[in-house]
Image (cartoon, helix red, strand yellow):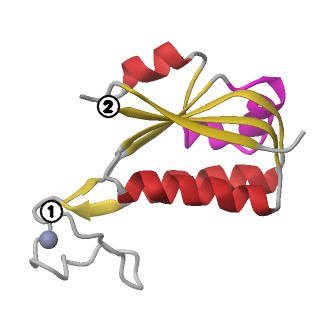
């Protein structure tokens, strides 16, 4: 089965429902575009519902990691500009306002991962990188206000 993707809003949370096989190919670009669109709209609470996912490969997992990086990017806590690290890995001052304060832009969580997805998350130790919840209700309740 091809990847399926649909989006909905629950309170102030954007839920992305994924289904089918999350593997390399055009479908991943669709997912990437969906995340970018949510971020562009300022939706900083994103829940990826994996309930209908039958299979995910390393490319699909890589795309989830990329989405996490996009949503949890580090921004200036004064003006909101995206911040970057210098060559030594230290955070640079804000190029816009010269502030040194920073914060994480948004939150991204996973819910309803099936057996194969859970196994792959454990095997790759990405279960420690992602905020993984067993149910959508748990995930929604865990978003910081
Ligand atoms: Zn700034």
Q: Which residue is mark 1?
A: 101
Task: Look at the picture and state if 89 lies above or below 112.
Answer: below
Q: Residue at x 81, y 23 (%)?
A: 115
Quadrant of ligand 1: it is bottom left
- Residue placed furthest toward the right: 1
The N terminus lies in quadrant: top right
Ligand 1 contact, mark 1 (Cβ < 8 Å): yes
Q: Residue at x 35, y 28 (%)?
A: 143
Within 10 Å of the Cα at label 2, are there few (<14), some (14-19), or many (20+) other Cα atoms? few
Q: Position of residue 47 (x, y in %)?
A: 50, 34
Q: Which mark is residue 83?
A: none
Residue bounds of the magenta highlight: 113-131
Q: Residue at x 43, y 51 (%)?
A: 38
Which residue is more in the foreground, 120 or 110?
Answer: 110
Q: Position of residue 79 (x, y in %)?
A: 13, 66
Q: Residue at x 46, y 57 (%)?
A: 37
Task: Look at the picture and state if 89 lies above or below 42.
Answer: below
Q: Main secondary structure of the magenta part?
A: helix
- Residue placed furthest toward the bottom: 87
Task: Look at the picture and state if 79 lies above or below 61.
Answer: below
């Amino acid at each position: 089965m091809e990847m399926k993707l649909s989006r909905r809003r629950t309170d102030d949370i954007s839920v992305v429902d994924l289904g089918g096989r999350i593997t390399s190919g055009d479908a991943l670009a669709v997912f990437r575009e969906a995340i970018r669109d949510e971020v562009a709209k300022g939706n900083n609470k994103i829940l990826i519902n994996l309930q209908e996912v039958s299979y995910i490969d390393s490319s699909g997992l890589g795309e989830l990691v990329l989405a996490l990086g996009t949503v949890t990017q580090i921004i200036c806590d004064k003006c909101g500009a995206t911040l970057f690290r210098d060559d030594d890995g230290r955070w640079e001052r804000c190029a816009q306002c010269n502030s040194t304060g920073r914060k994480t832009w948004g939150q991204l969580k996973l819910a309803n991962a099936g057996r194969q997805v859970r196994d792959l998350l454990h095997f790759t130790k990405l279960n420690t990188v992602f905020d993984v919840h067993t149910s959508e209700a748990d995930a929604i309740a865990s978003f910081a206000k």
